[in-house]
Amino acid sequence: MNETATASGYNFAYLDEQTKRMIRRAILKAIAIPGYQVPFASREMPMPYGWGTGGVQVTAAVLGPDDTLKVIDQGSDDTTNAVSIRKFFERTAGVKTTTKTTDASVIQTRHRVPEEKLRADQILVYQVPIPEPLRFLEPRETETRQLHALAEYGLMHVKLYEDIARHGRIATTYAYPVEVAGRYVMDPSPVPKFDNPKIGDCAALQLYGAGREKRIYAVPPHTKVKSLDFEDHPFRVQTFREPCALCAAEDVYLDEVVLDDRGGRMFVCSDTDYCEQRRTDGHRGKMLGKVPLGGEAA
Amino acid sequence: MSPLLCARGLSKSYGPRVACSGVSLDLHEGEVLAVVGESGSGKSTLLGLLATEIAPDAGQVNYRFRDGTARDLHTLSEAERRLLMRTDWGFIRQDAMQGLRMPVSAGGNVGERLMAVGHRHYGNIRETAEDWLSRVEIDPGRIDDTPKTFSGGMRQRLQIARNLVTHPRLVFMDEPTSGLDVSVQARLLDLIRGLVSELGLAVIIVTHDLAVARLLSHRIMVMKGGRAIEAGLTDQVLDDPREPYTQLLVSSVLAA
Ligand SMILES: [Zn+2]
C-alpha cells in the first residue's frame, strides 16, 4: 500500500502505521474467532467518544487509497456525525467518498445495516458503544469474560425472560443479542433487530469497533448468526403496516417523520440512499403520488 | 454406600493466621451436618473450602458424582466446577443480596438455573418457577416482582427456591436464618426442615446458633481456632458435650 502523507500533514488515515498494524492484528484475531471481543489499545481520536472512535479506528486500519468510503448514521448520510467522519477521512486519507451503498467498498455505520444486499468486496464497520451483551445483568468484567470463555449464556435468556414477564413479549428491539457461529454471544451494536437477519450469512466482512471499551469483534462473511429466543416466543423482526410513503418499499425499516403540528406524519425508509435509489428507479410512494420528484424521469 | 462428600486434612492460612487446620469430615446422602462455632472459629472458611470457593493449602475434598465416580473437587476444571455448582449443588447465603439477582424478578431468579442448563421454553420455565414459589410459601402472584420488594424472610425463601429448582443433592447454607426476627426464623427453619427431608438433601449448614443446629442437623461439628474440636450426633454432643469449650457454648445458649 502506498502510504503517502496527506495535505493535512497526518499519516494516511490519521493513525500511524504501527497503530494500524496493531489494530489489524486485533481484527485478524476477531475474524478468526467470530463474535469474540478482542481487546485492543484504543487510541485517542480527534473527536469525542460518542462519535464512534472505535469504528473510526477500525475504518482507518482497513482503508486503502483506492477505497471508496460511505458513512451512515441511523440510515442517513447527512447527519452531523456521518458528515464529520466522512470529512475526516477525506482530509486525512484523501479517499473517495460516496453516499451510494453499491459504490462503497468500506461502509462505516451507526445504528443500521444498509437495505441493499452487501457484496463480498465490501466491508461494513459498526460503531459500538457497549460491546458486552451480558453487561445488563453482570457488571463484573472478570465474570463476563469467564461466562464467555465457558459459553455460559443462561443469563442472556434471563434478560429475555424478564422482557416477556414485563411486556408479554420480547421487548428488546435494539442491540438484540445473537449467537455467532454456534459459539459466542454478541451484541450486534444498537441496530434495530430488524437488521439481525442481514448480519447472518452476509457476503461482506462485518467489523465492530468499541473505542471507549477498547474492543473489536467480527462476523466473517457467510457466518451463521442466530438471534436468541424462546421456543414459545420465537425471534421476530419488526413489521410495518404501510410501505415507505416516498418509494413504496416494503420489507424495509421505516422511520416516522412528523409532517406538521396537526398530527400529520408519514413513514419513510430509514436508509435514505436506498429510498433515493428506488425513486430514481421510478418507484412512487403515496406521498409522491404520480408526480415525479424534482423532474426525474418516472 | 460411600460418602457423598469426603474431606481430609483441609487447611488454609491467611498469612500467619490459621483459618482452618487439618479438618476432615464425611457427609452421606440425605444427611445434615451443622458446623458450629463462634465468629473467627474457621467455620466459614471451612464452608468455602468444601464448596470449592476457596483453594486449600493442603488436604482434599472428594465428591461422588451422579455417575458414581468420586473426584477431588479441587482438581476439577473451572467449567466442571461451575456446572456442578448450578446443577448438583446449592448455596444459600446469609446475605440474600449475594445469593439473588436483586434487579431480576422472582420468576427470573428461580428460572435462571433452568435456563443455564438449556431450558428454552418460557411457559414451562414460568410454570416451574410458580410451583417453586408455592413450595417456599411465596404467593405465585409475586412472580414478576423483584426481591427488592420482598421482606428478609421472603428473600431467604426465594434463595431456597432458586437453588432447589434443579434438584441438587447437596446444599451449603451459611447462617441462613441470622438477622431475621425470631418468628420469621422459626418459619424458615420449618420450611428448610420440611424440604430437606422431602427431597432427601444432604446439607452442610454453618451457624453460630446451636438452636438452629439442634433443629436441623443429624450431626454436628464444633470448631474453635480453625480446628474441629468435637463431632458427633447432634443430640449427643449438645446434651452431653465432652470438650470444655463445647460445654461453654451449650451453657451460654441455655443462659440466653
Ligand atoms: Zn423509501
Image (cartoon, coloured by chain):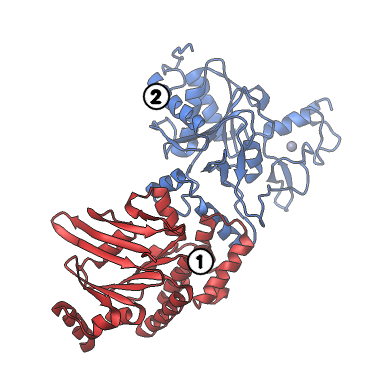
Chain colours: A blue, B red
Identify whether A59 is placed above or below A227: above
> What is the residue that sits farthest to the front in this orientation?
B1
Q: Identify the amino acid type marked 1.
A: Val
Which class describes the residues within 10 Å of circle 1: few (<14), some (14-19), or many (20+)? Answer: many
Which of pointers 1 and 2 indicates the residue nearer the eye? 1
At 55% across and 68% down in the image, what residue appears? B129
Mark 1 Cβ and ligand 1 under 8 Å apart: no
- Could you say where residue A180 lies in the image, as x and y percent from the top left? 56, 39
Image region (quadrant) for ligand 1:
top right
Quadrant location of the C terminus of chain A? top right
Say what amino acid the circle numbered 2 marks: Thr
Residue located at (47% from left, 24% from top): A61
Q: Secondary structure at mark 1?
A: loop
Residue B50 percent across, percent down from the top left = 31, 61
Residue marked by disc 1 = B165
Chain letter of the residue carrying label 2 = A
Which sits in the foreground, B117 or A108?
B117
Mark 2 close to ligand 1, CB under 8 Å:
no
Task: Decide which of A61, B175 is in the foreground and name it.
Answer: B175
**Mark 2 crowd level (few <14, some 14–19, many ≥20, 10 Å Cα):** some
Residue A226, quarter of picture: top right
Residue B4 quadrant: bottom left
Q: Is residue B218 above or below residue B21?
A: below
> Would residue B149 appear left or right of B128 to someone viewing this image?
left
Residue labelled with disc 2: A19
Q: Is residue B160 visible?
A: yes
The answer to whether A123 appears left or right of A26 in the picture is right
Residue at figure coordinates x 34%, y 77% from the top left: B217
CA separation, marks 1 and 2?
Answer: 51 Å
| Chain letter, disc 1 residue | B
Which residue occupies the foreground of this view, A273 or A190? A190
